[in-house]
């Protein structure tokens, strides 16, 4: 992997992990579009590089929401010491996040190997990316049909609704399905507005991305992983900065905008990449 390729992948990870366009899908499609035949996505050294990029993204989310996470952790510790739940807003959000991470944790363990089989070909990633766009269109359409005058705030979600949002997030195990896009659509259907749906999605993604990176830490000590150590460290920093700027932009964007522009992007790019793949123009 060249330094330029490492830089592009780091920027791609930092941006596409939080934008509802699927970082995993882009990690497969962009190298295929650019014919980066020198990169073996199954090689432990490449996986070690990707692990550090994910760590950078997770740390950026923690830094951006540092005040919120500090309040949540303090409230949850207090509830554990107290031995019961209270009406504290941060405490409830914290436990909503805990139950919301259960589906992706369970499904990730059960389906890790079958899903990895999809990583080798750009065609499935392209199809899932197009499907990701259709899901966002469907979510926006159903949200408008609800016609409710007021939306719920995050702490008004039920634990069952949080599990549903977490289950939606687990579809991001498929290359091309966006973690933030799927969980935002689920949040909208649970009557959150776009801004709160985005915030809950990012808060829910933080422990999932961080935990996934920690579980894959074994690749950092794989034979030959030291070869990409410097690229990984610099890439992690680039991914962190890109992720921080991305979440800052998206939280402003979703104050008055919706998912449809991202839906069009995913649909168009997914269909085009699928056609190119079937014509043998992606490698």
Image (cartoon, rainbow, N blue to C red):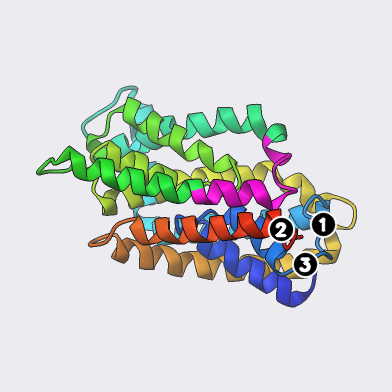
| Element type at mark 1 | loop
Q: Residues within 10 Å of mark 1 (few under 14, many from 20)?
A: few
| Element type at mark 2 | loop
Q: Which residues are magenta?
A: 115-130
> Are circles 3 and 1 on residues that touch, CB within 8 Å?
no
Residue farthest toward the right in the current orientation of the protein:
223
Residue farthest toward the left in the current orientation of the protein:
149
User: Along the horizontal axis of the image, is 189 left or right of 267?
Assistant: left
- The residue identified by callout 1 is 40
Q: Position of residue 93 (x, y in %)?
A: 32, 39
Rounded to the nearest angstrom, the CA distance separating label 2 from label 1 is 22 Å
Answer whether residue 262 is visible to the viewer in this image: yes
Residue farthest toward the front in the current orientation of the protein:
279
Q: Which mark is residue 36?
A: 3
Asked if the stretch drawn in magenta spans residue 116, the answer is yes
Rounded to the nearest angstrom, the CA distance separating label 2 from label 3 is 18 Å
Asked if the stretch drawn in magenta spans residue 173, the answer is no
Q: Main secondary structure of the magenta part?
A: helix
Q: Position of residue 103 (x, y in %)?
A: 50, 29
């Amino acid at each position: 992997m060249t330094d330029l390729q490492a830089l592009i992948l780091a920027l791609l990870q930092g941006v596409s992990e939080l934008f509802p366009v699927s970082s995993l899908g882009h990690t497969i499609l962009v190298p295929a579009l650019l014919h980066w035949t020198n990169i073996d996505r199954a090689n432990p050294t490449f996986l070690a590089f990707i692990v550090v990029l994910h760590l950078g993204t997770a740390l950026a989310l923690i830094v951006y929401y540092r005040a919120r996470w500090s309040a949540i952790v303090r409230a949850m510790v207090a509830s554990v010491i107290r031995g019961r739940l209270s009406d504290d807003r941060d405490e409830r959000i914290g436990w909503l996040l805990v139950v919301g991470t259960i589906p992706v944790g369970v499904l990730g363990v059960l389906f890790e190997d079958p899903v990895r089989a999809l990583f080798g070909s750009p065609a499935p990633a392209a199809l899932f990316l197009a499907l990701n766009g259709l899901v966002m269109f469907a979510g926006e359409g159903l949200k408008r049909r609800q016609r409710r005058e007021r939306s719920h705030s995050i702490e008004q979600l039920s634990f069952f609704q949080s599990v549903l949002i977490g289950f939606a997030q687990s579809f991001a195990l498929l290359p091309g399905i966006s973690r933030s896009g799927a969980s935002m659509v689920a949040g909208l259907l649970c009557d959150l507005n776009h801004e709160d749906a985005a915030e809950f999605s990012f808060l829910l993604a933080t422990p999932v991305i961080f935990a996934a990176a920690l579980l894959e830490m074994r690749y950092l000590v794989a034979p030959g992983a030291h070869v990409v150590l410097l690229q990984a460290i610099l890439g992690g920093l680039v991914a962190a900065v890109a992720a921080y700027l991305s979440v800052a932009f998206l939280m402003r964007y979703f104050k008055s905008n919706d998912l449809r522009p991202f839906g069009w992007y995913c649909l168009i790019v997914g269909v085009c990449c699928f056609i190119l793949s079937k014509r043998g123009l992606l490698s």
